[in-house]
Image: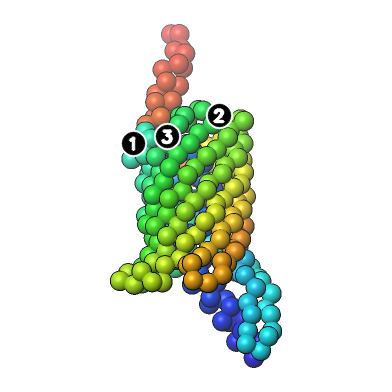
Amino acid sequence: MKFFKYLFAALSIVVVSSCASLTGYQDGRSLGEEAFEMTGSLNLSQSPDFFFDDEEVLDNFFFPNIEIAGKYGATDKLDVGVKLNTNLNFSLTSKYQLLGDRQSQTALGIGADIGTFGLISSLWNAQVPLYFSVHPSEKFTWYLTPRYIFQFAAGDLSTTIHYYGGNTGVLFGRKNKFGFDLGYYQLSNFSSSAVDLITVGIGGRFVFGGKEEETLEDDSMKKKPRRRK
């Protein structure tokens, strides 16, 4: 009997957390025009406590998922991308840098994401993240991403869920970065008690190309001394 309770709890946490991507790993800086970034991460989502009719309490547990994301620098300030994880969540993402540039010690950006569960599901979510980061050096980043998520079923707004929370973490590395992420969200549909959800994870970001990189390579070639004949 307890096996079925764990199965029910696992399915519940998948439905609650999979409709929305709850990962971080992003700072306030944009990629830069024509740059491309790949992100991969392993994340654990903590379930709430589950209470059953027989008064048994099933303690919370962590449920794993793997997420990959791709992002492209459409302009110097605007990034667009996609996310896909093993919870069957698919998202289209965007980020616009509001303050600072790619060398600023402090950066701020805003995003707008839309996602769905299972690609063909009627469950959708819309996200508005705010990306803030501090860069004491080019090899260390601390970020904070407060986020609001509105989850709904197409054609049935009575099943909406509101997510309030965000992510924070640290990244190490100059161009390619590795880091740790921690997220906390409170879920509510205003008709029942709120549910707390915690996520933890590790991940890496890998950047390729970009106009700025091409410019640096050209400048490096120009600075090479010519050999005397």
Question: In this rendering, is residue 18 above or below 210?
Answer: below
Q: Is residue 2 visible?
A: yes
**Residue at horizontal 58 percent and vertical 82 percent from the top:** 7
Q: Could you give the CA–CA distance between mark 3 and mark 2, rounded to whole angstroms?
A: 14 Å
Give the colour scheme shown.
Answer: rainbow
Q: Could you give the CA–CA distance between mark 1 and mark 2, rounded to whole angstroms?
A: 21 Å
Nearer-N-terminus badge (3/2):
3
Specify the label residue 98 is tagged with: 3
Whether label 1 touches label 2, CB < 8 Å:
no
Q: Residues within 10 Å of mark 3 (few under 14, many from 20)?
A: some
Q: Residues within 10 Å of mark 2 (few under 14, many from 20)?
A: some
Judge depth for marks 3 and 2 and give the one in front. Answer: 3
Q: Secondary structure at mark 1?
A: loop
Judge depth for marks 3 and 1 and give the one in front. Answer: 3
Identity, as a three-letter code, of the amino acid under mark 3: Leu
**Residue at horizontal 62 percent and vertical 44 percent from the top:** 170
Q: Position of residue 100 (x, y in %)?
A: 47, 29
Identity, as a three-letter code, of the amino acid under mark 1: Thr
Whether label 3 touches label 1, CB < 8 Å:
no
Q: Position of residue 73 (x, y in %)?
A: 37, 40
Q: Secondary structure at mark 2?
A: loop
The C terminus is located in which quarter?
A: top left
Question: In this rendering, is residue 50 above or below 131?
Answer: below
Judge depth for marks 1 and 2 and give the one in front. Answer: 2
Nearer-N-terminus badge (1/2):
1
Identity, as a three-letter code, of the amino acid under mark 2: Gln
Residue of label 2? 105
Residue of label 1? 75
Please name whichever residue, 82 or 61, is drawn nearer the observer in this view of the structure: 61
**Residue at horizontal 39 percent and vertical 49 percent from the top:** 112
Q: Residue furthest front?
A: 191
**Residue at horizontal 34 percent and vertical 72 percent from the top:** 156
